[in-house]
Image: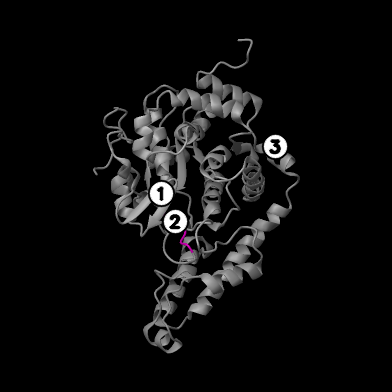
Amino acid sequence: MPAPSDTPNSTDSETNADASTAEAAAVDEFTVTPYAVDGEIDYEKLLERFGAAPLTDEQIERFPDHPLLRRRTFYAGRDVDDYLEAAAAGDPHAIVTGRGPSGPMHLGHVLPLYLAKRFQRATGATVYVPLSDDEKFLAKDQSFESIGEHTRKNLRDILAVGFDPDRTRIVVDTADADVVYPIAVSLAKHLTPATIEAVYGTQDTVGLQFYPAVQATHLLLPQLVGGRQPTLVPIAVDQDPHVRVCRDVAAKEALPVEKPGALLGHFLPSLAGPGKMSSSGDAPSIELTDDPETVAETIRTHAYTGGRATLEDHREEGGDPTVDVPFQYLRFFFEPDDDALERIAADYRAGDLLSGELKDLAIDRITEFLADHQRRRGELDSLADALDPYRLTDHERQRALERAGVPTGLDR
């Protein structure tokens, strides 16, 4: 299928409703949608289908330095230059990266949050973190009570990342429905069932059919609160359909907003091998609350390696770091030094570094990261007190509703 264009025309938009559900990248070799990821993913083919552009060397150099960008884990985007220009000029700019609280958070969930914190500290970006507890209730076989418990635990992990409360807003759909729902209703008026089916396929419930309007609210909220500004959404590629639907809505100029941009990333591999890291799959994942012993046992027992079958073969032929999951974890985030990472790869290829030794390196780096994260988590006050500085103020709520054209108050 040809890459979607970037115009608001109803027959030639980023979410062309004449496309079949294959537009969500469900193809013979692999499937990538917000609700399903399966098969061996061809990331370049995804760009063709989603209509995004690879990041250039010049763009990567203009971002705050970070291994997730330097090593092209985040490898493509939309309207990246607009965001970079605003950040360089000191003009308002925002990041949106959220969480679907259907279970404990693992390493793959938290990496975009740490990237967002890096941007915030380097350029002063405003960061919005929406939690889609309503979507998870609709999409998962869980009660509101169960989703609520996950939400509370996830919030503590999000707060432990260490965002600046003056430049960060955390929004929970059900808790902040007074602002989220009216805006979502106003946006839903500009979405057709054909568009939703083309992007997401047939949904099981009316609630999930409506949810893209809520997701669009998340992505536009920084502008509805703070005025027009470039907004960048760092996400794994399976979440890109949400961005494209929102960009189509924003392009209709029904609200005083610009189309949000996107920064698209690879999945952190499952311990079982290349692919998406998922807490719902067969392979275990490393959760943010795991202790050092659990991390070590999980990696030593379950992590796929690129080593040879025997010690003799490994010493003679060397290992393959490109498929070795412990090495990929180091490359994604946990070994910040590029020279050190290259030495590890070279030693592994030469057979001088064994698979068990490479696992131990990954265990050390990951447990150091988790120890710092867990320390900050443990230092938090009660959730209500810790969260309060990050919530939308009454003035911000009113301003967002007014910009969305929603009258506030029953005595209007």
Query: Furthest-bottom residue in view?
Result: 312
Q: Residue at x 62, y 42 (%)?
A: 143
Please name the residue that numbered disc 2 is placed on: 267
Is the C-beta separation of discs 1 and 2 under 8 Å?
Answer: yes
Query: Furthest-left residue in view?
Result: 2
Residue 309 percent coordinates (x, y): 42, 83
Quadrant housing the N terminus: top left
Q: CA distance from mark 1 to mark 2?
A: 8 Å
Please name the residue that numbered disc 3 is placed on: 388
Q: Is residue 299 visible?
A: yes
Residue range highlighted in magenta: 266-270
Quadrant housing the C terminus: top right
Q: Amino acid at mark 1?
A: Val
Residue 233 percent coordinates (x, y): 46, 42
Task: Indicate yes or no whether the magenta region holds residue 267.
Answer: yes
Point out the frontmost of discs 1 and 3.
1
Point out the frontmost of discs 2 and 3.
2
- For marks 2 and 3, the one nearer the N-term is 2
Task: Indicate yes or no whether the magenta region holds residue 292.
Answer: no
Please name the residue that numbered disc 1 is placed on: 237
